[in-house]
Amino acid sequence: MFVLFEETGKFLAGRILSEADSSLQVELDSGKRVKVKAAHALLKFEKPAPADFIAAGLKLVEDIDLDLAWEFASDEEFGFAELAREYFSADASRPASPEQQAAALFRLYDAPHYFRRAGKGRFRKAPPEILQQALAAIEKKKQITAQIATWADELGRGQCPAPIRDQLYKILFKPDKNSAEYKAVVDASRATHTAPLDLLQKAGAIASPYQFHWKRFLFENFPKGTRFPELQAPPVKDELPLADVRAFSIDDSSTTEIDDALSVSGLGSGTVTLGVHIAAPGLAVLPGGPIDAVGRARMSTVYMPGYKLTMLPDDVVQAYTLQEGRNCPALSLYLTMDEATLDITASSTRLEQVPIVSNLRHDALDNTFTEAFFEAAQVTAPVDVQWGVEMTFLHRLARHLKGQREIVRGKPENFNRPDYNFRLDNPTGGEPQGMETVTITTRQRGAPLDLIVAEAMILANSTWGQWLAEHGVPGIYRSQASMAPGVKVRMGTKSLPHAGLGVKSYAWCTSPLRRYTDLVNQWQIIAVTRHGRTAALAAPFKPKDADLFSVISCFDAAYSAYNGFQSGIERYWTLKYLEQNGITELTATSFKDNLVRADDLPLVLGAMGAQGLPRGARVRVKLGAIDEITLDVFGTVIERLDTEVLDASGTQPADEAEDDEEDIAAGPISIAVDIDEPQPDAEPAPAAAA
């Protein structure tokens, strides 16, 4: 005697060796003996042999029409043998054959949308409305499967279906792995043995490399688009006194968010007052308001060659920017100092209106206010140069402040490497398309005007940071425990030293139109200015405020993403510059592993032959092919240009180590798509396939 039974969702058959009330001992065709619970024994039969019996049942399954079986089935719970009798037997009093019963069992078991399981071998037919829904879902699944196959075939032939093009960035970076579009890319990738990104690029899904980088950034950071809601800048309600100063700002010509300005009073009297004047949106834009929500969502202005996404709407920016010819609401820091020694003797903070006399621009004045100009000014007072006297004092002060910081740092700051400026030939000034002609120029770090502004802002940020701490009001600080390699700058709510800058405290306060952290700190400073020793109770953010920690976390993530994008898109334009100017070779300097840094461009690349070269070795590199999607270019060292013996120890100052990290971060990007890559064949492909 044989028995058909169910074991872990499978149907097996074997010879009954012994039988008890609750179980059976069964021998399978393989010779294996198993213990089967009596409740799992579904059908006993005498012939044929188990394997033939199951094969016969499976063959009969093909003859069972599910719609007809559903009609025949009882509305009450029933067993598979009952359905087999109704379906196969012409005489309802005669049972169906064992093979027919097995076929009915198999068919019922594999059709849960028609029949619900109610126990071992027991079923109940699905209600009509549920059945129709299930059949509709099955049909829809068939259509989707067919659609996936069609799309995969089109991709394999180098054509990109519109739905896949529309979902490109979602498919690559944040896919719904159950979507038809995603599955089509995976299937096509496997069928063609092509990486998904390469497959989509060949199929024309990527309009241009520039658009790929730009739209990927928007997809990841601005999924709802970059348009601002309709907002009006609220007026400053405070009746602010008018400052008795003549202030001027120093920025690039492209700067529209003019956050900071300077003034100098009392020159020639022995006591000079430096004014650092910061745009004060914090007087009108309040925490929790609609403009605050916009700023908090973006956290910072996003910069890139030829374009930017501002943190705040332009109408709001224009309401508070330090525009020349206006009396602008400002948060002012006044520092009184001895004109001869430059020792600071007093400081005060005021809320006031500041007359902005000039918006000076770097590109117009860098060639005027040079080191040579200031050296000559020490001998002869500047004549016929607007702001020449003030600039001469500010340059002397900046050098003094920098020298004091470097004493604390323990070594001079490294200004050996230049900054690079990118200019696009884009007359419309709108969003770049990636094909504009790019010009790259250098600007030496620490140029006089840069030094003046940088030192004034460091002085303001460190002074206000300490001031907040003295009043027990939390702020958002940047600190660095030491200058040791690997010790990074961190953000927090406590006033701690910044070893890299050489200051006791450092809080970003001077760019409230461009950085949300600065706006938060401005609210805190305004509270101290108005309330003094009771400011801790009046400030928007209290000590250990969870919301303040949330701001830090969100800003850190956004700022890192924005800086990463800026580095990547600048690399794109650098590679474009190479192509547009037909540059196939360049001189470079080795600095780590097989990486070299171009001498005259902001470009780091791997170079064959650079491995093992000492740090600082100068070489000529022949460039290979450029990949504008991965932003990659490799080179080959074809000539060693220096003859001196360099230190090969591999150690370098902390400043240079930090520069190395920035360069590596700005190197070739990793396109880490979240999609299943095609796997290599388990066996070699047939010769015909090759």
Image: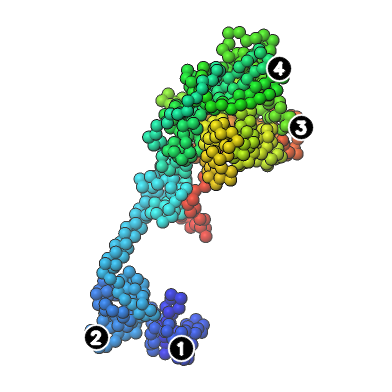
Q: Do the residues labelled 1 and 4 touch (CB within 8 Å)?
A: no
Mark 2 element type: loop
Q: What amino acid type is highlighted by mark number 3?
A: Val
Query: As rendered, which of 538 and 127 lies closer to the eye?
Result: 538
Q: How crowded is mark 1: few (under 14 residues within 10 Å), some or many (20 or more)?
A: few
Mark 3 lies on residue: 645
Q: Nearer the viewer, mark 3 or mark 2?
A: 2
Q: How far apart are marks 1 and 2 (CA)?
A: 31 Å
Give percent across and percent down for residue 630: 52, 41
**Residue 115 visible in the displayed image:** yes
**Residue 557 visible in the displayed image:** no
187 shown above or below 598: below
Instruction: Work out which quarter of the rendered image holds the N terminus and state it.
Output: bottom left
Q: How crowded is mark 2: few (under 14 residues within 10 Å), some or many (20 or more)?
A: few
Give percent across and percent down for residue 452: 62, 22
Q: How far apart are marks 4 and 2 (CA)?
A: 119 Å
- Specify the label residue 278 is tagged with: none
In the rendered structure, the answer to whether residue 60 lies left or right of residue 480 reads: left
- Which residue appears at 72% of the width and 36% of the height? 652
Mark 4 element type: loop
Q: What amino acid type is highlighted by mark number 4?
A: Ala
Q: What amino acid type is highlighted by mark number 1?
A: Ser
Give percent across and percent down for residue 212: 45, 39
Q: Which of marks 1 and 3 is in front?
A: 1
Label 3 or label 2, whichever comes before in sequence order:
2
Query: As rendered, which of 209 and 654 lies closer to the eye?
Result: 654
